Image (cartoon, rainbow, N blue to C red):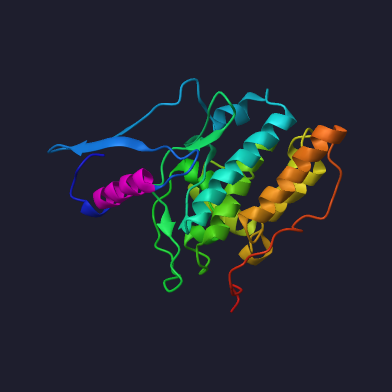
Amino acid sequence: FEKNENDIELNKFKQTIELQKNLVIDGLSKPISSFEDQSYYYAVFTTLKNSKSLLEISNSSTASLATKLHLAISTCQLVKALHNQQLIINTITPEKLLVDQNNQVHMLDLFFASKINIIKKGFTARSFDQQSLNTLAPEATGRMNQAVGQHSDLYSLGATLYKLFAECFPFEFNDEMEMVHAHIAKTPKLAHYRNANVPEQIAVILAKLLNKNPDTRYKTINGLLYDLQQCAEQLAQKGNILTFSIGAQDVSGKLTFSNKI
């Protein structure tokens, strides 16, 4: 990390490195050392041999439905572990997720992660690169007057999994403002209309994740994980995925208030 006049970002980077050192989570890359000189602050990570980004796999069109479900479940388990640490990840993108040779998903960094704060509910606007824009939650645009929370991670996760299954993002525009507007106001096509190989049941699950209103998304990563596991079990046992009522296990143990209140 290059040192410059912005001490805030440098301190944030140092805090991120310390956070990742202390978290014991399967799939989260851990720095093995860190040091600094006059110009840079360095962090050294172990490498994953023969790994690919989830984006590369999403673009390849060669992964089977069973493999995609396995990767989706592995990603959800990683997000669950981070959510259990009371973290909001804030940027989930397929570029930042690595898949090892055993098809287990790893996360590179938590630079934009933040702790859940029950008092401060506001959102501090920041710049977004094209990668982040592809999976940006509506409330994370800073234009919705809504709090950012773990429900925002679920939207970003939905856009990431949409790319995995449908082989395209929910919205694909080159113009930044058009992309932001789409996340706020446009409803993406159901994934099985974009790619006929996507089962309708998975398309419905993705649509629930991508609801504009956080109150109508999955309440917890547990509810999503259960539904994806049901899909995987049906595929393994019956060779296809039948429709079922989603969200049966989507129950939060926390007191939450509607964004309308």
Would you say 158 lies left or right of 39 here?
A: right
Viewer-side residue, 25 vs 240: 25
Magenta region: which residues? 9-22
Q: Can you name the residue that lies furthest to the left here?
A: 38
| Residue 108 percent coordinates (x, y) | 43, 38
Q: Main secondary structure of the magenta part?
A: helix
| Left or right side of 1 for 86 | right
- Give left or right: position of 132 versus 157: left
Question: Would you place residue 209 above or below residue 36 in this image?
Answer: below
> Most extreme residue toward the top, as rendered?
50
- Name which quarter of the figure residue 220 lies in: bottom right
Position of 68 with respect to 148 (left or right) is right
Residue lying at the far front in this picture: please name it: 24
Q: Quadrant of the N terminus?
A: top left
User: Can the viewer see residue 16 in this picture?
Assistant: yes
Vertical side of 3 occupied by 138: above or below:
below
Residue 210 in sight: no
Find residue 119 and report its horizontal and vertical position in percent. 43, 74
Q: Residue at x 46, y 21 (%)?
A: 49
Q: Is residue 154 above or below residue 63?
A: below
Q: Quadrant of residue 203?
A: top right
Q: Residue at x 51, y 62 (%)?
A: 149
In percent of width and height, residue 209 lies at 66, 53
